[in-house]
Image (spheres, rainbow, N blue to C red):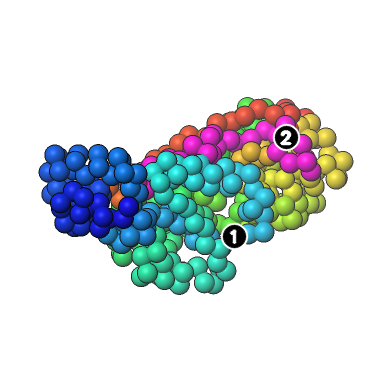
Amino acid sequence: MNLKSLAVALGMSKTTVSRALNGYPEVNFRTRERVLAAAKEVGYEANPMARSLAVGRSNVVGIIYPLLPTDLGDAMFLSVVGGMSEALELSKMNLIIAPVSPHNEQPSYEQMVRGRRVDGLVVGRTLVRDERIAYLSRAGFPFVAHGRTEIDTPYAWFDYDNEAGIALALARLLGLGHSRIALVGASLELNFARQRRNSFVRVMAGAGLRVDPRHLIADTLDRRTGYQAMQQLLACSPRPTAVIVDNHLSGVGAVRALLDAGIDIGKEMSVIVWGSVEDTLVGSNVTTIDQPEPRRAGAKMVEMLLALLAGTPPAQLQVLWQPVLLAGVTVGPCLV
């Protein structure tokens, strides 16, 4: 049975029946109940495309993402996306990921907004100064940022406490007597990398320690660059006694470089990696700054986006979760 037949059977207009089925407030309770009962009795289901046109919604949430080669093999990224998908399915919505080349990312956002192809967006890998977020804010388009950025306009964001995570790692290493500590990090255009670097420098200064500029390496966000960064640190004289890697993608390469160099990790050099490291190249017992429950984090971002679509102000949708330090075998007392 289609909408027209249902309306004829009820003796109502198609508009009234459609509005009742879609929950419009101007339809009174008794009429709505009567329409819903009749629809259930005859097994009527609304055409999803027609329903989307009627309510002005696509029931789709999007992610525009300049995918790196490592992303599709990244268990943490896939867990977050899986949590989003599951949460959207419960609301009878869908998630699309639109891979784009880096130079076409901003035009893709503008095209998506102009065409209203999705109801809202999740913006990943936020930059210190992020034109994507500035544009979406100006356009009044619903979005949740997975990370923060420097912008005056209130916006919805979900993030982990980057400063606190680095402070946890340093407290552990400093407590074990380490003073020559290095930081291997992602590009400083990325907000999380900038926050983690700033926290590292600040905590080290608070401990009365000067950071050797050679021990601060940026632009690592995969195994290859992580491997090369650790080789660079091993060539320093004196070399650091401990290293923090600010992302798990390059963390795998960094640990592999130590293994290949014959370094006794946890004794000759201590290592802490931000994010879960479970890889056949390095094993899984690495000391980590852990971002708990990535699947639940994905679901949380969907919950926030749905709240935004329902009218909650962006300033009330800002969530900061705390990382935790998970002990492994890659950290030990400073022996030199």
- Mark sitting on residue 284: 2
Q: Position of residue 206 (x, y in %)?
A: 52, 37
Residue 273 painted magenta: no
In this view, the residue in front, 208 or 123, is 123
In terms of secondary structure, where does tag 1 sit? loop
Residue 298 painted magenta: yes
Q: Is residue 219 left or right of residue 9?
A: right
In the image, which is nearer the foreground, mark 1 or mark 2? 1
Give residue 330's quadrant in the image: top right
- Mark sitting on residue 67: 1
Q: Mark 2 Cα within 10 Å, few/some/many (few <14, many 20+)?
A: some
Q: Mark 1 Cα within 10 Å, few/some/many (few <14, many 20+)?
A: some
In this view, the residue in front, 322 or 211, is 322
Name the residue: 77% across, 36% down.
283
> Mark 1 belongs to which amino acid?
Leu
Asked if one can make out residue 39 in the rendered structure from this viewpoint, the answer is yes
Asked if one can make out residue 336 in the rendered structure from this viewpoint, the answer is no
In this view, the residue in front, 117 or 246, is 117
Image: 92 above or below 187: above
Residue stretch rendered in magenta on the structure:
278-307
Q: Quadrant of the C terminus?
A: top right
Mark 1 or 2, nearer chain start: 1
- Mark sitting on residue 293: none
Name the residue: 30% across, 41% down.
40
Name the residue: 45% across, 72% down.
107
Q: Is residue 336 left or right of residue 59?
A: right
> Mark 2 belongs to which amino acid?
Ser
The residue furthest front is 9
